[in-house]
Amino acid sequence: MSTVLQHTALITAASAVWYAVAVTVAAVTAVAARSDARRRDAREVLKVLVRRSR
């Protein structure tokens, strides 16, 4: 059972890192993209990734 928990923790940590990378890339693109369309699209992606519950 210990091995299963270790693998679960590893998968959870890897998922958190990939999520953080995705948010960071979208945020940088939203700020630094040359075209207005790309900045707008990146902001839409950020809205989806960082959706807040009310």
Image (cartoon, helix red, strand yellow):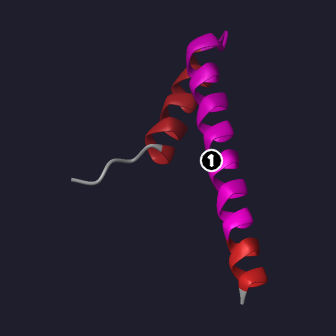
Q: Residue most toward the left?
A: 54
Q: Nearer the viewer, residue 15 or 42?
A: 15
As shown in the figure, which amino acid type bears the numbered disc 1? Tyr
The residue shown at (65%, 63%) is: 12
| Residue 38 percent across, percent down from the top left | 62, 23
Q: Which residues are magenta?
A: 9-35
Task: Identify the residue at image location x=62%, y=51%.
Answer: 16
For label 1, the crowd category at 10 Å Cα-Cα, with few meaning under 14, some 14 to 19 and many 20 or more, is few
Q: Percent x, y for residue 34? A: 67, 9
Residue 52 image position (x, y, % from top left): 33, 48
Quadrant of the frame with the N terminus: bottom right
Quarter of image, res 41: top right
Query: Which residue is under mark 1?
Result: 19
Q: Residue at x 62, y 30 (%)?
A: 24
Q: Measuring 76% from the left and 73% from the top, which residue is drawn there?
A: 7
For this orientation, the residue located farthest to the front is 2
- Residue 11 is situated, as x and y percent measured from the top left of the image, at 72, 65
In the picture, measured across the screen, residue 7 lies left or right of residue 45, that is right
Label 1's element? Answer: helix
Above or below for 6 versus 3: above
Q: Is residue 29 above or below residue 54?
A: above
Closer to the camera in the image, 50 or 20: 20
Give left or right: position of 50 versus 26.
left
Where 12 sits versus 8, above or below?
A: above
Q: Please, what is the dominant secondary structure of the magenta stretch?
A: helix
